[in-house]
Amino acid sequence: MKVIMLKGASHKGKTMTLRMVFEKLKSLDAELDPNFKNVPIPPKGDFGYKLNYNGKNIYINTGGDTAQHIFWVMGHAEGLGCNVCIVANSNKNSPIIFAEERHGLSNRIIVKKTIAKSKADENDANEKDRDEIIFTHLAEV
């Protein structure tokens, strides 16, 4: 399984960026997993969702404040039969070593969260990271 971690400090837009990844994939005709179709996405806060995009089973989870949670997310994604797991990773934990041990160095990608220079630039920073995740890293899987 390929693990894509969006890494950055707390309250810098990781959850919003992964929300934007989810919404963009849906707009690109990603199929929602039937087991998740009736799971509501909260308007704010963290969520986890499985979908299929270009033949890839993808699990997106926006929680990443503790290494323990990230380990659970990766195991959950494997249990769901996903070949890609996209997860937030706060700077205050370091599950990268775990990802390397469990999935191999070549199977993890760290995307460093772009920090907006101002409140007005937040959307552009999030879109930049969204597009890197979808059009660069998912394209490689």
Image (cartoon, grey):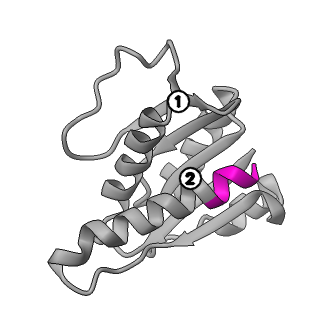
Q: Is residue 63 or residue 30 the one in the foreground?
A: 30
Q: In the image, 44: left or right of 53?
A: left
Residue 77 in the image: x percent, y percent? Answer: 62, 36
Residue designated by label 1: 30
Q: Does residue 89 show up?
A: no
Residue 70 in the image: x percent, y percent? Answer: 53, 52
Which kind of residue does numbered mark 2 sit on? Ile
Q: In the image, what residue occupies the spot 36% across and 50% down?
A: 20
**Which image quarter: residue 97?**
bottom right
Q: Does residue 33 show up?
A: yes
The answer to whether residue 17 is above or below residue 77 is below
Q: In the image, 105: left or right of 11?
A: right
Q: Tell me, yes or no, whether the highlighted magenta stretch contains residue 138.
A: yes
Residue 123 in the image: x percent, y percent? Answer: 27, 66
Q: Is residue 139 or residue 42 the one in the foreground?
A: 139
Q: In the image, 130: left or right of 86?
A: left
Is the residue under label 2 in contact with that under label 1 (CB below 8 Å)?
Answer: no
In space, the residues marked 1 and 2 are separated at their CA atoms by 12 Å
Residue designated by label 2: 134
- For the image, the number of numbered tags is 2
Q: In the image, what residue occupies the spot 82% across and 63% down?
A: 106
Q: Which residues are magenta?
A: 136-141
How many residues crowd around disc 2 within 10 Å: few (fewer than 14), some, or many (20 or more)? some
Q: Earlier in the sequence, mark 1 or mark 2?
A: 1
Q: Quadrant of the N terminus?
A: top right
Residue 57 in the image: x percent, y percent? Answer: 65, 31
